[in-house]
Image (tube, helix red, strand yellow):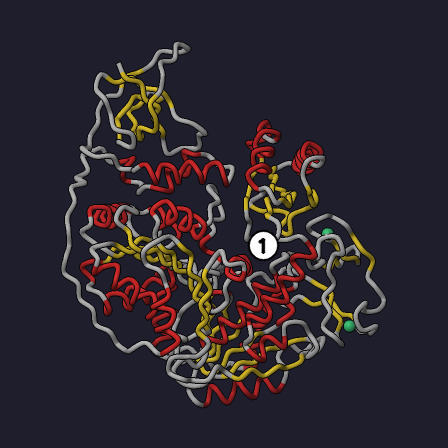
Amino acid sequence: MNFYKVLFPIAVKDGFIYSSDVEIEIGSRVLVPFRGKHKIGVVWDKASESRQYEIKPVLDVPDKKPVIDTELKKTVEFIARYYLTFIGLVLKSALPKRIFEVYSAIDLTEENSTFLNFSREHNLNQEQQYVYHNINQNEFGVNLIFGVTGSGKTEVYMRVMEDVLKKGKKCVVLVPEIVLTPQYIDVFSKRFSSDILSIVHSRLTPKKRFENWLNFKKGKTRILIGTRSAVFSDFENIGVVVVDEENDESYKQENEPRYNAKDVAIFRAKQHNIPVILCSATPTLESYHKAANGKFKLFRLKNRIKNIPLPSVDIVETNKSDFLPDYTIEKIEDTLKQKKTVAILVNRRGFSNYLVCADCGYLFVCPNCSVSLTYHKKSNDLKCHWCEASYDIPSVCPKCGSADIMNRGVGSQQVEEMLKRTFPKHDIERFDRDSVLTKKEFERIVGKLQEGKIDILIGTQMLSKGHDISKIGLVVVASLEELFGVPDFRAREKALSLVIQTAGRSGRAEPGSVIVQTVSKESELIRYIKTHNYEDFLKEELKNRMLLRYPPFKRVIRIIVESTNQNRSQETADKIARLIKDELDILGPAKCPVYKLRNKYRYHILVKTSEILKATGLIDKKVREFKEKVHFDVDPISFF
Ligand SMILES: [Zn+2]
Ligand SMILES: [Zn+2]
């Protein structure tokens, strides 16, 4: 008799033991009795007989081959351990849903597609050639292509993909959000034959998703383009993994399991000894730091391919009451007259109030945590959402001594209302996560945009995503301070990246212009925006992060406690803090910036560490008894 541990795609930390007369290969699907039903699971390990309970037999093994190989199994185990999450949930993310739902044999026989069709549009310029020739295709290595918007990063990695395909191997390309995929599919099907493309994203039907997964696994398709979860596709016979727009926040999953697809891609590529290509116009500080240290290979593309200059940037000061100064309004009018679209960039969440010096643009930050303080009108004070400290409103600015201090916080809704009042006859649309909910709605807006039917487009991060919208003649950043006045140690990085990426959208085909509105021309970040010099910013920001012991110099683990009961949420957070504070460097507990979410009250604790696995191990051990109410976010990106 053989015994096996079988894993199910549910919130469990371990598998369940079953017996079998025949030997079963690890990674195979099996049908077993589970909680009074027949359920499909995956054979995870061999097990020894346990006498504690009656062991049930495996009922059937439907497929001839395993659905999961040794390497992917190892990856799933690594993710569960590293991100302090349930291995069953990682398994659920790693395979298409249908695998566990439809009990019929999966034919995993290899099929080899050979037809390759390359239609190159342009030759590589010198910079691109240098990068292409210096990416080592034969072994593991992380290559960071740091190139200005429009510098032809895609063409470079497509050349590498071409080589990989010629060798009979396959490629995986991770792309940010689903909103981008139509455009990518277009680019890739034009370049390579669409017969060899598989696409994976969350909007596919389960059936289609399964088919695409299977075709790629069998080798019927050779290129897989997909969002985050595509990182779990079959890596057998892969020649390269590309992570496009590597700075994009959507690579991090914001619910269980909270993994980062970029890091998982690197982990897997290492197992397979193949190169990874990361691309961005604004790489993350973490990636840049690794590149500067020689852990990644850094490649710069400093020129735009069609030699179109980067857009000129106008810095416009706003005052207390005027969110749309005359200069901006005139520029908007001019652009509309030319029948071009105006894009207004606002912050995703307009709830955050902050205090800012009207003279020098200084933003008040917590001395303990170095994150923006939130202004509370009711108590007329400043609160830190990381360490719970509160501060009186200072009478003068600590940077320039001015007494002209004001509180700000203008949301996208207010800007929209103002624009509607000012331009009543024009077509104004909003385009962000909160307003674009359905696929239909999204397609309607994108369709209108492509036809040039939108006059003014108000949006958030979505505007910065790869949309090549040549119709956009002017980009207005409604409030620079609003972008970085949020409690997050990456606030400056995220704000500048957003502005530079959005500016890059303007004038891809011809020079466009950009207006950045700010309370003061002395404000932080302005000089980097004017020169489009992201690298200088990264160098400067690295010094701050080192001083404050934030990533990339330390790692962060965020512990979130949620409860429908206010007191219980705080009590649990306090208890956890007491349990770990002697051994770990912590901030908080404090109320989360979004304190009440889906009827639950939320507290968080931030752990800073240089030994991540030791810290997660310790937290796992000490905080086990609270599990139901506690979420862990290792290497968090969002702090709301
Ligand atoms: Zn000041
Ligand atoms: Zn603080």
Which residue is at the front of the view, 615 or 126?
Answer: 126
Which residue is at the front of the view, 148 or 253?
Answer: 148
Indicate the position of residue 492 as horizontal and vertical percent values.
Answer: 62, 64
Is disc 1 surrounded by few (<14), some (14 to 19) or many (20+) residues within 10 Å?
A: some
Identify the residue at horizontal 40%, vertical 55% (top origin).
141
Query: In which image quadrant can residue 107 be found?
Result: top left
Q: Is residue 242 above or below residue 318?
A: above
* Left or right: 593 in relation to 215: right
| Rendered-image quadrant of the N terminus | top left
Indicate the position of residue 154 as horizontal and vertical percent values.
Answer: 35, 68
Q: Is residue 169 visible?
A: yes
Which quarter of the rendered image does ligand 1 occupy? bottom right
Q: Is mark 1 within 8 Å of ligand 2?
A: no
Indicate the position of residue 145 as horizontal and vertical percent values.
Answer: 43, 66
Identify the residue at horizontal 18%, vertical 40% (top origin).
108
Identify the residue at horizontal 45%, vertical 29% (top origin).
13
Q: Secondary structure at mark 1?
A: loop
Q: Which residue is mark 1?
A: 552
The amino acid sitting under disc 1 is Pro
Q: Is residue 403 visible?
A: no
Q: Is residue 521 above or below residue 53?
A: below
Indicate the position of residue 52 as horizontal and vertical percent values.
Answer: 42, 10
Q: For the view shown, which residue lies furthest in the right direction?
A: 395
* Left or right: 585 in relation to 66: right
